[in-house]
Image (cartoon, helix red, strand yellow):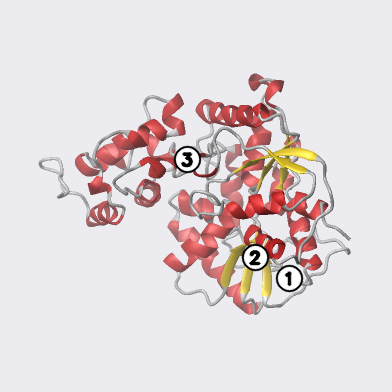
Amino acid sequence: MHVRHKKGFDWLPEIKQIINDTRAYSCLDCGKCTAACPISQYDPDYSPRRVVSNALYGEEAQLLRNGQLWSCLTCSQCEERCQSGVKYTELIKLLRTEAHGLGETGQCTHGDALQSLMHIMTATHLNQNRLGWVDRSLKTAAQGETLYFVGCQPYFDVLFSDIGVKTTSIARGAVKLLNHLDIVPALLPNERCCGHDLLWAGDMEHFIKLAEHNIREIKRAGAKQVVTACPECYLTLKVEYPRYIGSLGFDVVHISQLLAEKVASGQLRFRRLTQKVTYHDPCRLGRMSGIFDEPRAIIGAVPGLELVEMSRSRKSALCCGTQAWMNCGAVNKQIQAERLGEARATKADILLTFCPKCQIHFRCAMHDSRLGDELKVEIEDVTSLAARALSG
């Protein structure tokens, strides 16, 4: 099938390359992507099929200057349904990069605070107190073969203190678990944001700056293995850094992979916790990285825990409702309410996840008085739960 263009209009070479690289030309116009899209369920004006159609037959104004380009959750749910192999999520990411070059962007949330923070982190000289969360009970090092990449969790606790966010408990839990396994991880006092959100917002220039800085710092620490508890950091370091920067010289693993391996070998055991839990698959960890079994293996290794799956889980799991700190409105809140409703329907005591941002988005929705108190549920990261359940 050949790419057809609207008569009298010729795409820029960059757009043609994006169409080819993402297999957009293979679209059968069946609409299954739109039927699967969480945004389309609540916003009839948004359609992945229409975006692809505009990429093939439309004009620049319809494509790169269309505000709906930023509505996509980049959750990859549509790709699970596409029978033609169209890489829609990648299409959105690359088109946003082109749109960003034209001055287009999404609607930033939280008063642009997160975007401002990420741009500040690209500064060459920057004094941070990144390790203020490390207490005397934790063993860490300045250098070592295993490095723990923290991510932006220390900043999340400050920015979202009003909704009870304490994501540094994830970081403490991660180090505690590593110490329990006789691993003293290196920490980077000058670590920066991984750049995930800038990349998905189309800001390639500043993403590259962050990536190059972090790679330089990791290599300086002598790390051979980088462990992270954040799915977005994992996907960015594991997949995007090599794609845009080149070979890293170190391995990247998500902490769920490491812990599940230690559980399977008998090196990691937990004490009894008598609770009913359900698990939310983050998009970046699940659909986009294929990590589904490891979190469940960790949960299943805790005696007394009863895991009850939501009506949609694994590849069909519903997204937490927003992305890259952009375009979080009424439609997104409805998606979050729907997911929290699924969690409540399991009658679980705790909603577990492996993503600090998913936790933030769900907590934000639960603090929205317009959504009602019936959606409230206790939320905990699996890393924190595993650290809490350590035996001995």
- Against 166, residue 255 (above or below) is below
Q: CA distance from mark 2 to mark 1?
A: 9 Å
- Give SS at disc 3: loop
Tags 2 and 1 touching, CB below 8 Å: yes
In the rendered image of this protein, does residue 216 appear above or below residue 325? Answer: below
| Of the pair 175 and 9, the residue shown nearer to us | 175
Instruction: Give the x, y percent position of residue 208.
Output: 48, 63
Task: Please name the amino acid that badge 2 sits on.
Answer: Val
Label 1: few (<14), some (14–19) or many (≥20) C-alpha neighbours in 10 Å: many
Type of residue at label 1? Answer: Pro
- Name the quadrant of the C terminus: bottom right
| Residue 53 relative to residue 120: left or right | left
Label 2, on which residue?
Answer: 227
Task: From the image, tell me which residue sits under label 3.
Answer: 73
Q: Earlier in the sequence, mark 2 or mark 1?
A: 1
2 or 3: mark nearer the eye: 2
Question: Where residue 185 is drawn, which disc sits there?
Answer: 1
For the question of whether residue 61 can be seen, the reply is no
Along the viewing direction, whichever of 98 and 357 lies nearer the viewer? 357
Q: CA distance from mark 2 to mark 3?
A: 26 Å
Residue 40 placed where, x, y %?
41, 29
Q: Nearer the viewer, residue 78 or 187?
A: 78
> In 3D space, how far apart are the residues under numbered discs 3 and 1 (Cα atoms)?
33 Å
Residue 39, position as x, y percentages in the image: 45, 31
Pointer 3 local density, CA inside 10 Å: few below 14, some 14–19, many at least 20: many
Residue drawn at (60%, 34%), measured in percent from left and top?
A: 310
Q: Amino acid at mark 3?
A: Leu
Q: Secondary structure at mark 1?
A: loop
Inspect this view and state whether residue 355 appears.
yes
Circle nearer the N terminus (2, 3): 3
Q: Determine which of the numbered discs, if any, sits on residue 341 in the image.
A: none
When asked about the image quadrant of residue 177, the answer is bottom right
